[in-house]
Amino acid sequence: MPDGIRPSADAEALLHLSGVRKRFGGVVALDGVSFALRAGEVHALVGENGAGKSTLIKILCGIVQRDAGEIELAGAPYDPHAPGDAKSAGIQVVHQEFNLLPYLSVAENICFEDMPRKHFGMVDYTSLYAKARKALDAIGLADVDVRRPVESLGVAHRQLVEIARALMGESRILILDEPTATLTERETQRLFTIIAGLRAKGVAIVFVSHHLQEVFAICDRVTVLRNGASVMTADIAATTPEQLVSNMVGRQLAAAMAAEKTVDTGGKTALSLRNLRHPASPFAEGVSFDLHYGEMLGIAGLVGSGRTELLRSIFAADVAVSGELQREGAPRSYRNPGDAIADGIGFVTEDRKEEGLILSMPIAANVTLASLKDVSRLGLVDKNKESRLTQKLGGEVRLKYGSPRDAASTLSGGNQQKVVLAKWLANKPRVLLLDEPTRGVDVGAKAEIYALLRGLAEQGLALLIVSSELPELITLCDRILVMSKHRIAGEVARKDFSEEHILNLAYKDERRHGQH
């Protein structure tokens, strides 16, 4: 039996799945999933990529059909064979990728499938706008003009227009697939207010997310999928993030994420900064610290505190205006990133899609981007060498892919990040700068990346890690430096780690300078 609580029969369920199975060729996508959804509840569906969430959603909305198992809706058999069947039954899905037509108005998008008509088939725009206005008002979206083209809206408003369209009919069930993926914190809170309102009206909501803090903020119950099976269903109040992670990734990876770390800051000094100042810094003194081999040093701070700029200065992606950088005690003056790379420094950037990868190129070409000299002869890339190196490093970073020739764009976010890591490991760096190393990856890939980074530190690499997730820094690092306004506001030793202590340092410095 999996390490969780199996769903049992639920007399209150509006929607009930029992033993649902689906196979695509030789791949088992769903392996006996059971799931119960009640009216007026927000039910989280969580699991790492490949756990079966997308397949389950497609079955519920009629895109694919199950091979076995039973589904009941309001006590009657439910067997949709097309999306129209699901909509007729009151089940609507808001997908992660928007399904809006950008050149049409908000009203035309909302009413696209049921456009009000006059005689001779002409659109009744008065009725159209009134109908769309009513749909937006129902979810508290009074600030959007229904006549505006959708392309003029921001991402958050497009998301809410999708929800308004989904609720046009007699929707009993709303499935939200990663609804906050592109939203800011404020926009997310607005969405949560709308979700709470729908719950109060009796709408049943399936909330698919890999952000556990959101699951605990808005959901009533949670079901965990792992390897196509439902391994746990529980009331939110009766579980913890640690228990969900354990069920999502299995005990071994969960242990890797939570394992206590042996502090190691006694190695030889790998990198030293002395008053290094980025052009954006308003202060003259810059940043000073030492990073040792075998150490994982975290950089915390609020948005705009200068964390990313610090890494870019070290890597010579941005040129420091003053101060000194030393490698193993010797002064360095990098003119460009090529100099830093040649001196054993790698940089996993914040935005892998823009700066870390060339998505249209093969996985193998991306892996060898920083080490072309090792797979080239007479200026030409040896494809066999390139593939062999990709297979070797792919194994080291636990990369899941089909062929080295597949485009990087075909990979999940977690596997794309592993390609970026493999790219730098191919160059055998001694110092690795990491900016948001697990942003946009699922919990399983996050656990694997944690284990990989710990392994690199144990091999003697010096790691400098910027992350907006304080639990991540607390899990990984030996020390944490807190930045504010491009300066070091404080240093926290591992024995003193706490989110409250780190945030107090960040905000204290912000408040102090704000008073001047």
Image (spheres, helix red, strand yellow):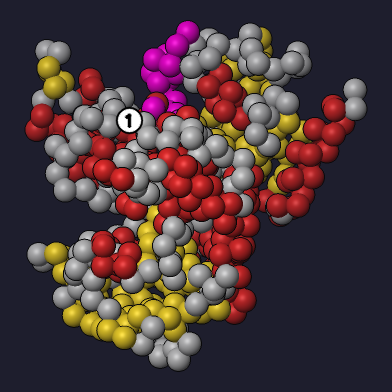
Residue 368 left/right relative to 509: left
Left/right placement of residue 104 relative to residue 405 reads: right
Residue 356 is situated, as x and y percent measured from the top left of the image, at 37, 30
The residue carrying mark 1 is 357
For the C terminus, the image quarter is top right
Task: Classify residue 425 by image quadrant.
Answer: top left
Q: Amino acid at mark 1?
A: Leu
**Residue 371: horizontal and vertical position, in percent?**
27, 25
Magenta span? 335-354
Q: Inspect the magenta stretch and tell me whether residue 363 lies in it.
A: no
Q: Is residue 50 visible?
A: yes
* Whether residue 283 is situated above or below residue 400 in the rendered picture: above
Magenta stretch: residue 342 in it? yes
Seen at 34% across and 53% down, the residue is: 114
Residue extending furthest right? Answer: 515
Q: Residue at x 66, y 29 (%)?
A: 304
The image shows residue 373, relative to residue 78, as above or below, that is: above
Q: Quadrant of the N terminus?
A: bottom left
Q: Is residue 39 above or below residue 284?
A: below
Image coordinates of residue 153 in percent, x first then y, are 49, 34
Point 23% across, 82% down: residue: 69
Horizontal arrangement in the rendering, residue 512 relative to residue 459 (left or right): right
